[in-house]
């Protein structure tokens, strides 16, 4: 059967053989006879070498082989264990059944695959349908997007055109806005330039007016650059007309405000100085407005009795500074009005005092010239400072370059009214004043106020009046000083026995000290003290020293003259040494002191040498010449006479008594006394040195042992005496 089955196969299938061999190998049949026969049978079908290879291969360890066998085993029909197999192999019918079973299994798998493929195909076809639908939708969307894109591009093109036109229109609008802002006045400002129903103007009027001036200035400048621009010509004409109307409104407002002014003001309403500032470019209207203001104020000020520093209004006014003719006329009217007021106030403070009673009338102080005049000048200075503040406030918005000059000029006009009453009272007070110190302080006081009234012009009448008063008081001072000094010195007498300065000298020095002490006041800071001291000394010290010399000449002894002169000169020196700019005079006095000390020194040294018998020896030693031969051969220079003189001088050194003049004890200055004594000893030592040199010279023929002390011993002894 086996052979037949094998022969029935048209071809040999190695795969089938391999699967069968695997089954056989896995079975426990190696010791079975049937297996052996089967192997022999197989050897006839398969080459021996192939069989050996299969048998010798270790297929039991092959995982793939094992998995294949396990798979086939599940397909092989179950064998009944009770049925005994007569053959070693299953029949080939079973093999065919197995193959059939495998084919069926494969067919079932294929059918299942086909079913699954059909399902997948259906799904793919459904997906394709959806894709086609989506493609249609996308194509539709693409067409719509393309259509929208074309429409959008058209819109963008139109938008770009509109934006370009918008920018052009905006540029034109900006140009027009800038043009009208620069060369036209807004409606609100144009309305603000009209006055209200009551004729007043508000703060908005001045803002609009300043803007109108700026616009006119801009338009005028542009018209200069482009004179053929008709629009600018029309604009300038229109704006100028508006400006003229504004000036008229402003002038009417100033007239109204000036008529409403009261007397008690130190500050003006803001509307006034703003109006004046606005009108300053129109000189005629400016001066007319100031004239209106001055007339209005003058009617009140002339009859006003107001305290000088307590009343006032709110703010200062700014004049119409650009209209010079109106401006100066208005300021002149203002100054005249204020001058009348300040004169009236000056008369009141002189006769009535302050309104609140805190200050008495200045006229009550007329007995005290210094305080009387100082209070008047102080009140005037303070009043002018207030007037300056008022004018500064009035002109605070005007041009700075003219304000200072106008303020000084206006203040000078105001102060001019005070000159006559002030000068009259001061001259009367000066005529009554006989104290030279007071006159000196008054002259310095006038000069002080001349320097401090810098708020006035240099050619101001008040400043010139004070300068005249300074010159008058200075002349009166020096005249009074000369008269006083002459009167004092006319009573000068000869000094007493003590040789002290007489009373006239002390009075004159006291007067000089009072005059110099008065310069410690602050008012004297502006005075040229050096020049003033020179004049004072020429009027006081020079006559004093001359009279001292004259009186001293009446003394009997020249030593008395020297001592008295020393005492007087030291007294003068002690006074003037305390002050500045006295160096020249101090040098002159010191020279005179030294001259008088020389007299005393010479007299004392001569007296000492005379008393010791050395005067004749000194004179001959001093006049001796080498050509005369030996000094001992000269008459009167014999050795015996020299020894006698030296003995007397040594005795004096041992017991120095009576070598000083009694007049030296009357010297009041300790420094002068010490100086006289010291210089006397120096002269004696100098004379002794001459004698010592001659006597110790061998050529003069004197013995070496004469008891002559050396110069150093004599100097030491005399210094002990002086100490």
Image: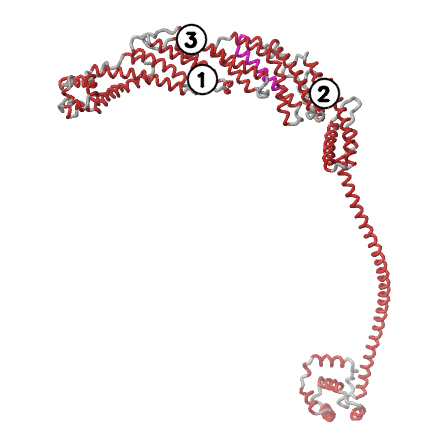
| Cα–Cα span, label 3 and label 1 | 19 Å
Task: Report the residue at 17% width, 19% height from top.
Answer: 646
Q: Nearer the viewer, residue 225 or 243?
A: 225
| Cα–Cα span, label 3 and label 2 | 64 Å
Name the side, left or right, on which 667 lies relative to 93: left
Q: Which residue is mark 1?
A: 533
Look at the numbered disc 1 and give the secondary structure of its residue. helix
Looking at the picture, how far across and down is residue 5, in whole percent?
80, 91
Looking at the picture, how far across and down is residue 629, in whole percent?
15, 23
Task: Report the residue at 69% width, 17% height from top.
Answer: 294
Which comes sooner in the sequence, label 3 or label 1? Answer: 3
| Cα–Cα span, label 2 and label 1 | 55 Å
Quadrant for residue 651, please give it.
Answer: top left
Q: Which residue is mark 2?
A: 288
Magenta-tinted stretch: 365-387
Name the side, left or right, on which 531 lies relative to 221: left
Evaluate whether residue 653 shows in this view. Answer: no
Look at the numbered disc 2 and give the secondary structure of its residue. helix
- Residue 369, magenta (yes or no): yes
Quadrant for residue 674, please give it.
Answer: top left
Count numbered badges in the picture. 3
Q: Which residue is mark 3?
A: 486
Name the side, left or right, on which 285 lies relative to 606: right
* Residues packed near mark 2 inside 10 Å, few (<14), some (14 to 19) or many (20 plus): many
């Amino acid at each position: 059967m086996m052979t037949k089955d094998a022969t029935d196969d048209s071809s040999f299938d190695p795969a089938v053989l391999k699967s069968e061999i695997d089954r056989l190998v896995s079975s426990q049949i190696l010791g079975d006879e049937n297996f052996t026969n089967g192997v022999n049978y197989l050897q006839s079908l398969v080459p021996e070498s192939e069989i050996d290879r299969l048998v010798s291969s270790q297929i039991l360890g092959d995982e793939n082989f094992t998995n294949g066998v396990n798979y086939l085993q599940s397909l092989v029909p179950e064998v009944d264990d009770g049925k005994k197999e007569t053959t070693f192999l299953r029949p080939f019918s079973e093999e065919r059944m197995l193959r059939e079973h495998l084919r069926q299994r494969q067919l079932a798998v294929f059918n299942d695959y086909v079913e699954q493929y059909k399902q997948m195909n259906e799904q793919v076809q459904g997906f394709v349908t959806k894709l086609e639908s989506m493609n249609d939708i996308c194509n539709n969307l693409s067409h719509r997007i393309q259509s929208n894109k074309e429409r959008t591009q058209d819109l963008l093109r139109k938008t770009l055109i509109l934006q370009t036109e918008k920018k052009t229109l905006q540029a034109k609008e900006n140009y027009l806005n800038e043009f009208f802002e620069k060369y036209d006045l807004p409606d609100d400002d144009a309305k603000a330039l009209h006055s209200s129903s009551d004729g007043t103007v508000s703060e908005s009027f001045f803002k609009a007016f300043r803007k109108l001036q700026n616009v006119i200035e801009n338009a005028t400048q542009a018209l200069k650059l482009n004179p053929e621009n008709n629009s600018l010509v029309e604009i300038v004409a229109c704006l100028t007309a508006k400006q003229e109307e504004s000036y008229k409104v402003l002038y009417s407002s100033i007239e109204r405000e000036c008529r409403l002014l009261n007397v008690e003001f130190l500050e003006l309403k803001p509307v006034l100085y703003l109006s004046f500032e606005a009108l300053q470019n129109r000189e005629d209207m400016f001066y007319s407005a100031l004239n209106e203001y001055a007339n209005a104020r003058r009617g009140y000020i002339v009859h006003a009795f107001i305290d000088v520093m307590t009343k006032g209004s709110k703010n200062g006014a700014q004049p119409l500074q650009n209209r010079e003719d109106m401006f100066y006329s208005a300021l002149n009217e203002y100054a005249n009005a204020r001058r009348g007021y300040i004169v009236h106030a000056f008369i009141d403070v002189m006769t009535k005092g302050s309104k609140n009673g805190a200050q008495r009338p200045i006229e009550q102080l007329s007995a005290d010239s210094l305080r009387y005049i100082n209070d008047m000048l102080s009140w005037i200075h303070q009043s002018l400072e207030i007037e300056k503040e008022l004018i500064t406030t009035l002109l605070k918005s005007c041009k700075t370059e003219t304000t200072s000059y106008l303020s000084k000029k206006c203040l000078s006009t105001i102060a001019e009214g005070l000159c006559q009453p002030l000068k009259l009272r001061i001259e009367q007070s000066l005529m009554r004043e006989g104290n030279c110190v007071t006159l000196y302080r008054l002259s310095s006081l006038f000069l002080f106020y001349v320097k401090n009234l810098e708020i006035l012009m240099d050619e101001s009448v008040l400043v010139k009046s004070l300068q005249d008063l300074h010159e008058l008081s200075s002349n009166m001072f020096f005249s009074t000083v000369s008269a006083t000094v002459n009167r004092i010195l006319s009573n000068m007498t000869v000094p007493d026995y003590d040789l002290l300065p007489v009373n006239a000298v002390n009075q004159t020095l006291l007067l000089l000290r009072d005059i110099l002490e008065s310069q410690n006041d602050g008012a004297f800071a502006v005075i040229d003290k050096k020049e003033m001291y020179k004049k004072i000394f020429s009027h006081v010290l020079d006559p004093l020293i001359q009279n001292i010399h004259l009186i001293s000449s009446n003394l009997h002894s020249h030593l008395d003259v020297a001592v008295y002169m020393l005492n007087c000169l030291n007294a003068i020196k002690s006074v003037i040494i305390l002050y500045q700019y006295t160096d020249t005079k101090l040098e002159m006095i010191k020279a005179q002191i030294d001259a008088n000390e020389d007299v005393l020194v010479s007299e004392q040294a001569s007296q000492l040498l005379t008393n010791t018998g050395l005067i004749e020896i000194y004179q001959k030693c001093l006049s001796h010449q080498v050509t005369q031969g030996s000094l001992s051969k000269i008459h009167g220079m014999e050795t015996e006479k020299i020894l006698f003189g030296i003995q007397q001088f040594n005795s004096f050194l041992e017991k120095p008594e009576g070598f000083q003049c009694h007049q030296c004890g009357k010297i009041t200055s300790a420094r002068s006394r010490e100086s006289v004594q010291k210089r006397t000893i120096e002269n004696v030592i100098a004379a002794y040195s001459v004698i010592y040199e001659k006597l110790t010279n061998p050529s003069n023929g004197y013995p070496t042992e004469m008891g002559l002390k050396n110069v150093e011993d004599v100097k030491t002894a005399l210094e002990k005496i002086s100490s």
